[in-house]
Image (cartoon, rainbow, N blue to C red):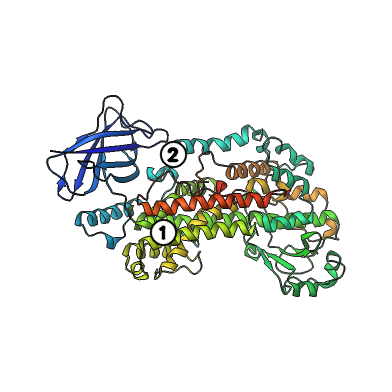
């Protein structure tokens, strides 16, 4: 009789433990152990528990290949989350770790593999090849594609978050915080009684302070004080949530008939427009992507969208400043070019229209499409095409946590019918992510040929390419080299971490003071500069109800998440090999160095850019 020591770890989140019966069977090269009820004196499988048991076998099993876990109901159904199982063979040989990280629901059984990462060609044992195939077949039945709207990436087939498998759902603490934080924003900030005042305009700009009294940030307060200033407008083009829009302008667009005389007073005294164009000091914001987009009708009231062109100038003393704004793409008598020397209220409203367009593009393209929706494609494809033992699954899994549920909630609760930053921080983080990924890829793929021959990997990239619907330019349908694989993984992980942090985490800072970045506009763009009055501005900016919603939603989405796992921190150990763990440990140390470097760079700055501190970048898209 052979005796194996089996250690079982239960999840640490609320309700992870169980009172149900748990059985284990060890499956080895030479046979199976006895089916053993895991039952020590006292309570077993409590939240966070690590319990040890003895499992016997009539004879040696050889190498233990799989661990079969079974759960059976005792009195009442009680789900169980298993983190991992460890097996120590008789005589004290090498302890094997079997990662699980899944829920057992109902009377069910799962078989989990030893944690060494393996591609398909690394497996030769028929039992393991069968397990690999069965796991993917089951996952492809569970995780299906759905076309939610034409022209955007496909998503997980789930009408609401309740339709998602439990393994990709929020844990109880996350769910409770998510569902109560918006309620808190409305109730505790005393916004609820204001939020029902749909259609009622604020009396004046000072009135917006009525929803700006309790929850603030230093940047939000700074925005309130400086939002009218041209240099601050330019600052946000480079350091706000969406620096993608600004581009260098070497030639004035034909549909923006700005003359040198129009902008001369905004330039430095010793220069002119032609010189500054040639010197590379003129920049352009072009929101042509919004041209022709139909605006919403809210409670029977038509809202309005513009497609502005905004010319900016890098002034030697004032910094980046706007010097001309046209609110539509087609010039004409009803499409004036607004200038800083125009009546102050006309210039202020023109800038507000640009910031409103920025809000639309930032939320829908930079935030929703380029992070949430693209990463969801990677998430679903990974679950469908890569078994848990695959090294690329292990690499991606921590960066896909909660993404399916937050996207599902977004589709049903936020966007349904009912419902240049500091470049050194950006580039250093990207370079570091690329570095650890390149090393991981080379650890498991010794040549480009290994990449080409990995059938599971090729099925994965085909799934991604077919379902992303052209929203990732240049995406290959075949992976031919280790470099191509590493680059693709870098883009996916960077989008799920640093890119999402850069676009999401500053929402409250830049949008809490509603006039700085209005979420909607209730009057059409002005066609005559002289007609702009404070009454028109107040009638155009979001009303009382809309302002409350903007304030609450941006706080809800942009606040630090209480259960956030920072970039480089891993609560689940999918990799069990020493070589992989060494790379992860090195990654963590290098992130600490970047953190210190960013903090040093920001010392003494009145406006600090800290959105890309590694400690503030979540390991996945969870909000």
Instruction: Residue at 87% x, 67% y: name it.
Output: 269
Q: Position of residue 309 (x, y in %)?
A: 71, 65
- First reached walking from the N terminus: tag 2 or tag 1: 2
The alpha-carbon separation of the residues under discs 2 and 1 comes to 29 Å
The residue indicated by pointer 2 is 171
Q: Note whether 590 is above or below 161 in the view shown.
A: below
Whether residue 144 appears in this view of the structure is no
The local crowd at label 1, few if under 14, some if 14 to 19, many if 20 or more residues have their Cα within 10 Å, is some
* Disc 2 + disc 1, Cβ < 8 Å: no
The local crowd at label 2, few if under 14, some if 14 to 19, many if 20 or more residues have their Cα within 10 Å, is some
Residue 265 horizontal side relative to residue 326, left or right? right
User: SS for tag 1?
Assistant: helix
Classify residue 429 by image quadrant. Answer: bottom right
Q: Position of residue 322 (x, y in %)?
A: 77, 61
The residue indicated by pointer 1 is 440
Instruction: Residue at 19% x, 57% y: name it.
Output: 126
Quarter occupied by the N terminus: top left
Residue 612 horizontal side relative to residue 123, left or right? right
User: SS for tag 2?
Assistant: loop
């Amino acid at each position: 009789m052979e005796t194996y020591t089996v250690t079982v770890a239960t999840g640490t989140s609320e309700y992870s433990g169980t009172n149900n019966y748990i059985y284990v069977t060890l499956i080895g090269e030479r046979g199976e152990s006895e089916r053993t009820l895991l039952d020590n004196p006292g309570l077993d499988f409590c939240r966070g528990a690590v319990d040890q048991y003895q499992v016997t076998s009539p004879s040696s099993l050889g190498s233990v290949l799989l661990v079969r876990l079974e759960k059976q109901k005792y009195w009442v159904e009680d789900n169980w989350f298993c983190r991992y199982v460890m097996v120590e063979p008789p005589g004290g040989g090498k302890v094997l770790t079997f990662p699980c990280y899944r829920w057992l629901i109902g009377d069910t059984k799962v078989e989990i593999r030893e944690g060494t990462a393996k591609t398909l060609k690394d497996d030769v044992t028929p039992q393991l090849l069968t397990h690999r195939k069965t796991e993917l077949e089951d996952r492809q039945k569970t995780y299906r594609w759905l076309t939610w709207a034409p022209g955007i990436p496909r998503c997980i087939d789930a009408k609401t978050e309740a339709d998602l498998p439990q393994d990709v759902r929020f844990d109880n603490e996350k769910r409770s915080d998510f569902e109560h934080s918006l309620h808190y924003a409305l109730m505790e900030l005393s916004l609820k009684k204001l939020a029902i005042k749909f259609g009622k305009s604020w009396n004046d700009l000072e009135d917006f302070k009525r929803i700006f009294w309790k929850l603030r940030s230093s940047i939000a307060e700074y925005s309130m004080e400086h939002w009218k200033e041209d240099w601050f407008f330019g600052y946000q083009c480079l350091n706000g949530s969406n620096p993608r829009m600004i581009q260098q302008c070497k030639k004035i667009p034909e549909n923006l008939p700005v003359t040198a005389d129009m902008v001369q007073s905004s330039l430095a005294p010793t220069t002119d427009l032609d010189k500054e164009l040639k010197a590379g000091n003129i920049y352009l914001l072009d929101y042509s992507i919004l041209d022709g987009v139909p605006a919403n009708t809210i409670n029977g009231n038509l809202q309005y969208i513009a497609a502005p062109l905004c010319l900016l100038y890098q002034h030697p003393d004032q910094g980046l400043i706007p010097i001309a704004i046209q609110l539509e793409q087609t010039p004409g008598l009803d499409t004036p070019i607004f200038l800083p020397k125009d009546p102050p209220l006309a210039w202020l409203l023109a800038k507000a229209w640009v910031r409103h367009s920025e809000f639309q593009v930032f939320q829908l393209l930079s935030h929703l499409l380029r992070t949430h929706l693209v990463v969801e494609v990677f998430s679903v494809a990974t679950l469908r095409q890569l078994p848990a033992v695959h090294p690329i699954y292990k690499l991606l899994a921590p960066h896909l946590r909660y993404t399916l549920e937050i996207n599902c909630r977004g589709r049903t609760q936020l966007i349904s019918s009912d419902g240049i930053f500091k470049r050194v921080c950006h580039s250093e983080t990207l370079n570091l992510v690329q570095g650890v990924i390149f090393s991981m890829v080379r650890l498991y793929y010794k040549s480009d040929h290994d990449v080409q021959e990995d059938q599971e990997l090729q099925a994965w990239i085909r799934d991604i390419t077919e379902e992303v619907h052209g929203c990732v330019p240049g995406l290959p349908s075949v992976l031919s080299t280790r470099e191509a694989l590493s680059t693709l993984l870098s883009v996916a992980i960077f989008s799920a971490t640093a890119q999402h942090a850069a676009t999401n985490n500053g929402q409250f800072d830049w949008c809490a003071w509603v006039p700085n970045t209005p979420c909607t506009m209730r009057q059409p763009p002005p066609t005559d500069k002289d007609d702009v009055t404070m009454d028109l501005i107040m009638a155009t900016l979001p009303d009382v109800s809309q302002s409350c919603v903007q304030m609450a939603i941006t706080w809800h989405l942009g606040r630090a998440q209480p259960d956030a796992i920072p970039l480089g921190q891993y609560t689940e150990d999918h990799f069990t090999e020493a070589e992989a763990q060494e790379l992860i440990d090195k990654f963590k140390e290098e992130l600490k160095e970047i953190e210190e470097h960013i903090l040093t760079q920001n010392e003494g700055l009145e406006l600090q850019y800290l959105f890309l501190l590694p400690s503030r970048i979540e390991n996945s898209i969870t909000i």
